[in-house]
């Protein structure tokens, strides 16, 4: 047996003797030795992370908005962001309110707005200048009662015409009335000689 092997055997024997007599001390020593492995710090449970995600989604929905172009007789015409579900009067308020020349009855201020819509507030003088010639109905200024005097135009269709011009602005030509849902060539032929755009 070599000298190195003999020394190793002797050391092993000593360790066994010590371990046998001092088992408790050896175990305490071993348990005190750091393993080098540490638990990763807890940054939040899965439920907490999910809750944060839900909160972010709710906030995003809460902040959803539409963009509306407000023009005509308002203090500061322009494009304004508004919360979804806003009404026309809120768009007018965002544009600084109505001017003294505004025709306050020409726009339905209680109407709920949609994204990309245009709110045009005409002037009182425009309404008077746009008065229809005798025997004709001005589709840009006529109210529902006047529109229903046209052949084939009932209360529902009259409201469609008013809603269209409030959303898209005045009709540029009489044939543009066919852009209104429900007004096709047949109805247009009936009313074209009785309407004007001013």
Image (cartoon, grey):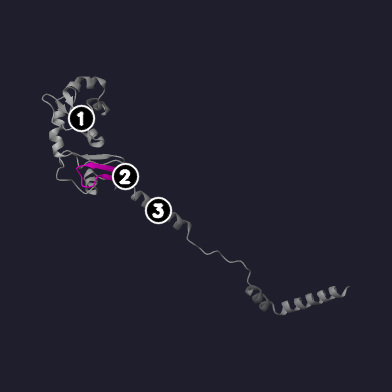
Question: Which residue is the site of mark 1?
Answer: 156
Mark 1 and mark 2 in contact (Cβ < 8 Å)? no
User: Sequence-wise, which precedes: disc 2 or disc 1?
Assistant: 2
Local SS, label 1: helix
Q: Where is residue 108 in the image (x, y as percent from the top left)?
A: 19, 40
Vertical order, 18 against 117 (above or below): below
Question: Which residue is the site of mark 2?
Answer: 66
Judge by depth and name the residue closer to the eye, 172 or 87: 172
Magenta part, dominant SS: strand
User: Sequence-wise, which precedes: disc 3 or disc 2?
Assistant: 3
Judge by depth and name the residue closer to the eye, 141 or 46: 141
> Pointer 2: residues within 10 angstroms few (<14), some, or many (20+)?
some
User: Sequence-wise, which precedes: disc 1 or disc 3?
Assistant: 3
Report the quarter where the N terminus lies.
Answer: bottom right
Looking at the image, can residue 179 be seen?
yes
Q: Is residue 40 left or right of residue 143?
A: right
Q: Residue 30 carries which label?
A: none
Q: Does the magenta stretch include residue 72?
A: yes
Give the mark toward the camera: 3 or 2. Answer: 2
Q: Where is residue 153 in the image (x, y as percent from the top left)?
A: 19, 25
Local SS, label 2: strand
Numbered range of the magenta stretch: 67-80
């Amino acid at each position: 047996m070599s000298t190195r092997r003999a020394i190793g055997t002797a050391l092993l024997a000593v360790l066994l003797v010590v371990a046998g007599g001092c088992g408790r001390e050896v175990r305490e020593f071993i348990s005190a030795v750091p393993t080098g492995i540490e638990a990763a710090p807890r940054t939040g449970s899965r439920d907490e992370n999910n809750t944060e995600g839900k909160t972010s989604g709710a906030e995003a929905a809460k902040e959803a908005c539409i963009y509306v172009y407000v023009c005509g007789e308002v203090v500061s015409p322009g494009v304004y962001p508004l919360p979804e579900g806003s009404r026309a009067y809120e768009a007018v308020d965002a544009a600084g309110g109505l001017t003294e020349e505004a025709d306050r009855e020409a726009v339905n201020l209680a109407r709920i707005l949609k994204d990309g819509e245009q709110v045009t507030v005409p002037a009182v003088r425009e309404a008077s200048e746009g008065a229809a010639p005798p025997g004709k109905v001005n589709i840009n200024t006529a109210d529902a009662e006047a529109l229903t005097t046209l052949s084939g135009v009932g209360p529902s269709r009259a409201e469609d015409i008013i809603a269209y011009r409030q959303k898209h602005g005045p009709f540029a030509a009489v044939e543009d009335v066919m852009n209104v849902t429900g007004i096709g060539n047949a109805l247009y032929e009936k009313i074209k000689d009785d309407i004007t755009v001013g």
